[in-house]
Image (tube, rainbow, N blue to C red):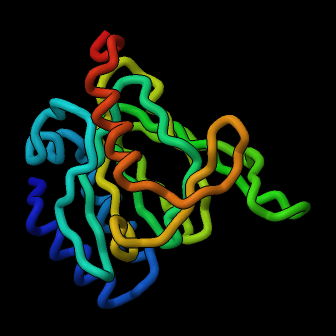
Amino acid sequence: MFDIDRLVEDCRQAIQRDRTHKSVREVIARAVSDPGAVLAAMGEPKHAGLFPIYRSTELTILNLVWGPYMTLLPHDHRMWAVIGIYTGREDNIFWRRIETGDGHHIEAAGAMALAARDCAVLGRDVIHSVTNPISRLTAALHVYGGDFFAAERSEWDPETLDERRFDVEAAARRFEDSNAAPNRGQ
């Protein structure tokens, strides 16, 4: 049986033992190994959004729900992240900085598809964009090794791939916009 309070406590204890992602990954992998239990505890996702479960300077835990066909721009976190999918699918494109020129541009460098029961780790320097490629909501536990909402970080323009300061409010609006999209639920 999945318990949200137990998850928070287990993640907090994990980073006290090991400040890296390793122990937290074990906690999240164990949780999403039974996606039905997580879904029962969290509730069937009703709309897209970033739903904080726990937030401190050392750790942020989110219930992150992607809208149908929603895409988030290339961005970094500047802290490690552990992602555990409990319903739906999330596709990641990984990007790397181009070493020539001003270093503020990126190019595609790989990809990874995650589905229910999958758990992945992103290092502190990873740049990625995320798409929910399916016609229904996707939900995942996202754990970050710091304060996700307060961190200074970057995003890249989807057309020019120019780097700019990450705008948390604009990202939140993208989730809200996906709730109003005409393809929602098709």
How many numbered marks have been drawn onto this rendered protein structure? 0
Q: Is residue 153 left or right of residue 28?
A: right
Q: Residue at x 49, y 62 (%)?
A: 121
Q: Is residue 72 left or right of residue 182?
A: right
Q: Is residue 33 visible?
A: no
User: As displayed, is residue 22 above or below residue 102?
Assistant: below
Q: Position of residue 13 (x, y in %)?
A: 23, 83
Q: Position of residue 111 (x, y in %)?
A: 64, 42
Q: Position of residue 17 (x, y in %)?
A: 33, 90
Q: Position of residue 90 (x, y in %)?
A: 45, 37
Task: State the image quarter where residue 56 is shown.
Answer: bottom left
User: As displayed, is residue 41 above or below residue 179?
Assistant: below
Q: Residue at x 91, y 61 (%)?
A: 100
In the foreground, 43 or 64? 64
Q: Residue at x 41, y 62 (%)?
A: 82
View extreme (right): residue: 100
User: As displayed, is residue 32 above or below residue 27?
Assistant: above
View extreme (bottom): residue: 17
Q: Is residue 17 visible?
A: yes
Q: Residue at x 65, y 49 (%)?
A: 94
User: As displayed, is residue 65 above or below residue 81?
Assistant: above
Task: State the image quarter where residue 116 is shown.
Answer: top left
